Image (cartoon, rainbow, N blue to C red):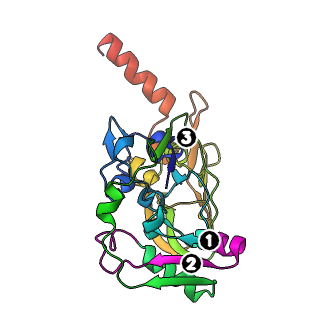
Amino acid sequence: MKIYADFSYCVRSFWKGSSCAKCVEACPAGALYVGSGRIEVEPALCVGCGLCRASCPTGVFDFAEGLGPAVSCREGGPCIHALTLEDYKRLVEKYGEVVVDARCDDCKLRDRGRGLEVLEKAVEMGLRIRVLRGKGGDVSKRLLFRKLGDGLLIEVRRGMPARREFRRPYGAEGYLVTVDTARCVLCGVCAGVCPTGAIAVDEESGLITVDGGKCVECGVCQEACDVGAIKMVKRAVDLEHYVVEVVQCPNCGTIYAKNRGECPVCGFTTRLIKEVYGL
């Protein structure tokens, strides 16, 4: 199945220092790799399995066309690991019942994702899904020779960083961003690199708002924080507020986090003057 990849949603588009390479690790064909701080693609190697889609927290990858009522990697469809619980819900809502080929027992890709676990959860929820189980042969080799006519199985788009809307229910179990107010200097980097806008920083009031419902658990905010004020903690998803103590500089009037130790404006100016005049 052809894959559409829009890298404007990639966490590396927001911060090149990110170490996220989940799609690279998931790809069984070596079509994705890290180069010059971003994810690069070798379209000729893509087999259209869709494992990248399930691995990406920000939704860079998606199917170029809709799925039908029968999902099978043996019939040109995606690998079962590419499907999410929301996919099954939408398919059952659209077709009434779907058939899923889960004959993965002897496939080398069987343990490359959480596809079987997600499928079982969908079945337990009572969704009308007919599952084909057992052994169906190792399709991993066949995937490597899959072609779409004379075309390629991935279409790539790059552009300015774009935030994707994401929402998960409050109260659900997951990882949530926590802020150590004794370390935070209100630099705002965490809010700037967040690919879904889950963090908001008000430098004047010292208020930091973390909307766990928008968080995709990518962890880029934790990576980007150079004072170690952010941690990802497993807890119930919620909307949380943190307050960092602020002070006002008596010289220039700038409001800044007390944790900085000095006014960022006056401090920088003083250091610049000393450097220029050799003081």
Looking at the rendered structure, the secondary structure element under dot 3 is strand
Looking at the rendered structure, the secondary structure element under dot 1 is loop
Q: Tell me the CA gap for discs 2 and 1.
A: 6 Å
Q: For this rendering, which residue is in front, 94 or 62?
A: 94
The C terminus: image quadrant: top left
Across and down, in percent, residue 271 comes to: 38, 23
Query: What segment is highlighted magenta in the picture?
Result: 89-113
Of marks 2 and 3, the one in the foreground: 2
Q: Determine contact: label 2, label 1, CB under 8 Å.
A: yes
Which residue is at the far top?
277
Q: Which residue is drawn at 64% across and 54% down?
A: 165
Across and down, in percent, residue 264 comes to: 48, 33
Q: Name the residue under label 3.
A: 256
Q: Which residue is drawn at 32% across and 75% down?
A: 137
Classify residue 228 by image quadrant. Answer: bottom left
Which residue is at the far front?
149
The amino acid type, in three-letter code, at marker 1 is Pro
Looking at the rendered structure, the secondary structure element under dot 2 is strand
Q: For this rendering, which residue is in front, 127 or 99?
A: 99
The amino acid type, in three-letter code, at marker 3 is Tyr
Lower position in the chain sequence, tag 2 or tag 3: 2
Q: Mark 1 points at which residue?
A: 69
Residue 271's place in the image compared with 54, above or below, is above
